[in-house]
Amino acid sequence: MEKLSALSHLFLTHFLHSFSTSMVTPAMTDAFMSALCPGEDECSLAIYLSGLQKTIIGLGTLVTMPLIGNMSDKYGRKALLTVPMSLIIVPSAILAYSRTRNFFYAYYVVRTLMAMVCEGSVQCLALAYVADNVPESRRASTFGILSGIASSAFVCGNLSTRFLSTSSTFQVSALVAIAALVYMRFFLQESIIDEQISTPILTYKGNGKGKGKANAACFAHEIPSKNVQVFKSAPSLEDMLCLLKSSVTLSQAAVVAFFYSLAEVGLHASLMYYLKAQFHFSKDQFAVLMVISGIAGTVSQLVIMPLLTPALGEARLLAVGLFFTCVHVFLYSIAWTFWVPYVASMFSLLFVFSQPCMRSIVSKQVGSCEQGKAQGCISGISSFANVISPLVFSPLTALFLSERAPFPFPGFSIMCVGFASMIAFIQSLMMRTAPPIANQKVVNSNYVDA
C-alpha cells in the first residue's frame, strides 16, 4: 500500500507538470509568428529559430540526461526531480508577463538554457521511479499508465488553451508548474532507500559473466567481491557504450529510440508550420487537433494497453505502435484538405504504444540500482536525435513551404519524417527481447506487487 501511495503521488505530480507544459504548446506557434512575422501565415525565420532552439536543447540534453539519470541512482529521484521542475517555471513566467519582441527573445534564450536541463528529464526520472516500485511483470502496463496520465494532462491542457486567451495561457501554465513543484516536494516519497543512496552508483561482483552485466573489458579496475564506482562524475561516452554492450536487446532498443525520436522531433518541428501555411490553422485548431490525439492516446494507454501487453508482449506491441506511427505521419504529409490532419491524429489510439513498451524493455535489462542510468542513457540517445532532426527537417520544411520549393509538395519534409519512423519500425521487427535479469546488484529489492 505504501508503494501504491507513492505511485499515486508520482502520477499526480506528473499530471500537473505535463498539464503545465502541454497547455502552452498550441499557443507557441502563434507566439513565434506574432513576434517575428506579425500578420503572416508563413515565416521562415520562425521555423529556423524553432529548429535552432531544438538543436541547442538536444545538444544540452545529450550531456545532461545521462548525468541526471545517473545521479538519481546515487542521490535519489525526488532530489533530482526538484531541479527541472523548478527551472521550467521561468520561461512561462516571462511570456505570462509580456509577449512583445524583446520579451520573446528573452523567453527564447531562457527557455533554451533551461530546457537543456529540463527537457525530458521529468519523464526519465518518473520512469526510473516507477521501475523502483513496480515488479517486472507489471512494469509495461504501469509505464503505459504513466504515459496515459501524461496524455490526459495533454488533453486537459489543450482544452484549457481552447478557452483561455494567449496571455492567460502562459499565466496559468506558470501557476500550475509552481503547484506541481510544491506538491512533489511535500508529498512524493523517495523511492530509493538510504542504504542505496549512500552506496556507489555501480557495484560489481564476480568475473563479469552473466546477463545484464557489462563485459569485463568495460571495467578497468575489477576487484572481485568489492564495490567499484565506475561513474564517478558525469558518465562518459565509453560508459554509455559499455552499458549498451551489456545487452543486445538494450543496443537494439537504442537504435529504435534514436530513429523514433528523430521522427518525433522532426514531426513536431514541421507539422504546425505546415498546417498553418496549408490550411491556416490557428491556436484553436491546433488545440482541437491535440485534444483528439490526446484523448485517443489516453484511452489507449489506460484501457487498451494493459489488456494487450500480456497477450502480445512488449516487443510485438512496440512494432504495432511504430507501424501506426509511420501510417499517421505519411497521412499528414499527403493531407489534401483541412479534415485529414484530424483523422491522422486519431491514430494516436495505436501509435502511443511505442514509448512505454520501449522503456519497459530497457528497464528489464538492468538491475534496480541502474534504472536511472539506463533510462538516462536512452534519453541521451534520443537527445542526440533531437540535435540532428531540426538540422535536417527545419530547413527542409522552410524550403518546401516557400516559393523556392524545387517541386510542389508542401508535405515533403513530413514524408521524410515518415521514412525515419519506418527505420525504427523495421528495427523493432528484428528485436528479440532477452529474459529480464535477476535483481542481483542490490541486496534490498524495491520490487513489490502493485
Image (cartoon, rainbow, N blue to C red):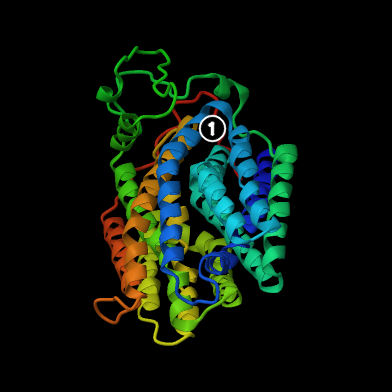
Q: Horizontal and vertical percent for residue 239?
A: 34, 30
Q: Is residue 292 above or below residue 92?
A: below
Residue designated by label 1: 72
* Residue 362 shows in the view: no
Q: Horizontal and vertical percent for residue 191?
A: 61, 34
Q: Which residue is drawn at 58% across and 20% down?
A: 195
Q: Is residue 424 left or right of residue 51?
A: left
Of residues 444 and 198, which is closer to you in this image?
198
**Which quarter of the figure is the C terminus placed in?**
top right
* Residue 263 shows in the view: yes
Secondary-structure class at tag 1: helix
Q: Quadrant of the rendered structure where residue 61 is?
A: top left
Counting labels gives 1
Amino acid type of the residue that numbered disc 1 sits on in the rendered structure: Ser
Pointer 1: residues within 10 angstroms few (<14), some, or many (20+)?
many
Q: Quadrant of the rendered structure where residue 267 is?
A: bottom left
**Which quarter of the figure is the N terminus placed in?**
top right
Q: Residue at x 30, y 30 (%)?
A: 238
